[in-house]
Image: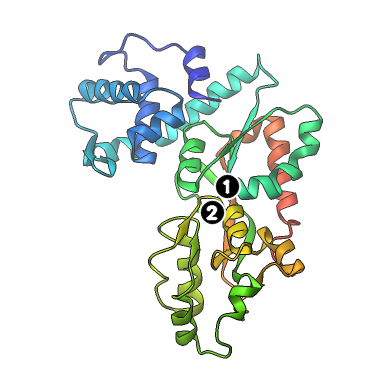
Amino acid sequence: MDYAERRAAFPAGNGGPDDMQLGWLQTFIAVYHTGSFTKAARLLGITQPAVTQHIRGLEADLGKPLFDRTPQGAEPTVEGKALAHDIETPITQINAAVDRYLDQTSSNRPVHIGGPAELVTARVLPSISPLIASGIDVRISLGESPELLAALKNGQLDIAISTIQPRCRGVEGLPLTDEEFALVASPRIADSLPAGLAAADFTRALEKVPLIAYADTVPIIRRYWRTVFEIPPPAHPAVVVPDLRAVVAAVVADAGFSVVPTYLCARELTGGQLVTLLDPEVPPINTFYLATRSGSQYDARLSRLYDLLAEEGRQWKMTAQE
């Protein structure tokens, strides 16, 4: 259930110390979890000035500052952290109660699912297509795990598939599946590297080859480098593109090398368009979690989708060898 639907179902009062608006508290929790007024506005589907107005109204009523504005976003004050600790669970319970109330009159409300673009495209949508065909309406949100979990916590999503294990109150996470990472390049790039090098010499040789990365912070490559080589990763990628499918395409086209999940490049590995540069005894992996709000599966449609994803996730082929 989204923010606008909840506000329409239970209109707020005029504000003030004796009539604090529920929406202000929901906005506060959104800012607290995203660390940003802008990201909170995007999650809630309202404008950034509206978020600012809500937080200022709440601070005025409480007589305490709740956030410090910084170049990085919004940092909760001591009072802000204390308030979040006190109201997180009640806000989650209120949102769930409103969802139950509205579901009594809107049995075909869409189920909102969020996840990484690549996994949703390659695995999630094919897995849930039978339920979509049976009449369940679904709305998909694509994004990174911190924002998806914040959207789940604040009621913008019903299910989130996250690479971060949920550890906040009111959210439950089930290990869903593991993705395996491989260091890959095109055959031409691979042939240009000296054979039989020790690990240290091998990483130095790779420094001469352009690195294709998912993000400037190279999180996937960092995990591989620290797990396999036990050293920091290359610091300066030549290309950054926030879609792993595009990373695979660039590597196939001889642009450079990268570390990618094997389920996204199994066809290219089988067809010889890509080769693995190393075959470590224990390949680095990453776990996906199927996350929902505690107690949210009262909705039969949501429960069916959750159960289907949990079952299908155990059968997804996520490594090149499967």
Question: Which residue is more in the foreground, 186 or 78?
Answer: 186
| Count of number-bearing discs | 2
* 264 is higher (above) or lower (below) than 32: below
Q: Which mark is residue 196?
A: none
Amino acid of disc 1: Pro
Question: Which residue is more in the foreground, 249 or 198?
Answer: 249
The picture places residue 14, in percent across and down from the top left corner, at 32, 8
Disc 2 and disc 1 in contact, CB within 8 angstroms: yes
Relative side of 244 to 263, left or right: left
* 190 is higher (above) or lower (below) than 201: above
The picture places residue 173, in percent across and down from the top left corner, at 56, 49
The residue that appears at 47% across and 81% down in the rendered structure is: 205
Residue 282 in view of the camera: no
The residue that appears at 65% across and 17% down in the rendered structure is: 104
Question: In 3D space, how far apart are the residues under numbered discs 2 and 1 (Cα atoms)?
Answer: 9 Å
Q: Label 2: few (<14), some or many (≥20) within 10 Å?
A: many
Q: Quadrant of residue 253?
A: bottom right
The residue that appears at 45% across and 55% down in the rendered structure is: 215
The picture places residue 71, in percent across and down from the top left corner, at 24, 43
Q: Secondary structure at mark 2?
A: loop
Q: Residue at the left extreme?
A: 63
Residue where numbered disc 1 is placed: 116
Relative side of 162 to 13, left or right: right
* 153 is higher (above) or lower (below) than 222: above
Q: Secondary structure at mark 1?
A: loop
Q: Quadrant of the C terminus?
A: bottom right
Residue where numbered disc 2 is placed: 163
